[in-house]
Amino acid sequence: MEENMEKKDEKEMTLEEVFARLEEITKKLESPQTTLEESFALYKEGSALLKKADERISLVDRQVKEIAEDGSTTDFQ
């Protein structure tokens, strides 16, 4: 499963997949077998995933606020 998530484009990943990948990255970073070079690559990947997740969560938050304000829905995509 981990290999599939590494190959899957960030834009195609669901939030659940992003969080699962972030957990995998965290475990690898905590491992003493992970080299310094691997750690840097994992940190970079994790930072990018975290940014994408934050953007998606912010979008959903705005959508919920919009719905709450006037009762209608708006597609922000």
Image (tube, rainbow, N blue to C red):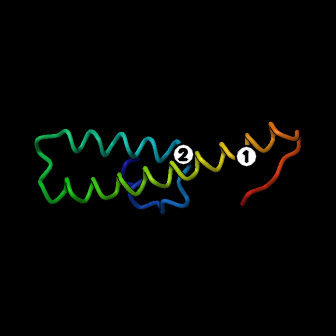
Residue 68 is situated, as x and y percent measured from the top left of the image, at 80, 36
Residue on which the image places disc 1: 63
Q: Which mark is residue 74?
A: none
Residue on which the image places disc 2: 15
Label 2 sits on a secondary structure element that is helix
Residue 51 is situated, as x and y percent measured from the top left of the image, at 45, 54
Q: Nearer the viewer, mark 1 or mark 2?
A: 1
* Number of other residues with Cα within 10 Å of mark 2, as a class: few under 14, some 14 to 19, many 20 or more: some
- The residue lying at 58 percent from left, 45 percent from top is 57
Residue 32 is situated, as x and y percent measured from the top left of the image, at 11, 41
Residue 6: quarter of image: bottom left
Q: Judge whether 68 appears above or below 48 on screen.
A: above
Residue 61 is situated, as x and y percent measured from the top left of the image, at 65, 42
- The residue lying at 27 percent from left, 54 percent from top is 42
* Number of other residues with Cα within 10 Å of mark 1, as a class: few under 14, some 14 to 19, many 20 or more: some
- The residue lying at 78 percent from left, 44 percent from top is 66
Earlier-in-chain disc, 1 versus 2: 2
* Picture quarter with the C terminus: bottom right
76 to the left or right of 57? right
Residue furthest to the front in view is 69
* Type of the residue with mark 2: Leu
Task: Using the numbered discs, state the Cα–Cα distance from disc 1 to disc 2 in whole angstroms.
Answer: 16 Å
- The residue lying at 26 percent from left, 39 percent from top is 27
* Type of the residue with mark 1: Gln
Could you tell me if the residues under marks 1 and 2 are in contact, i.e. CB atoms within 8 Å? Answer: no
Label 1 sits on a secondary structure element that is helix
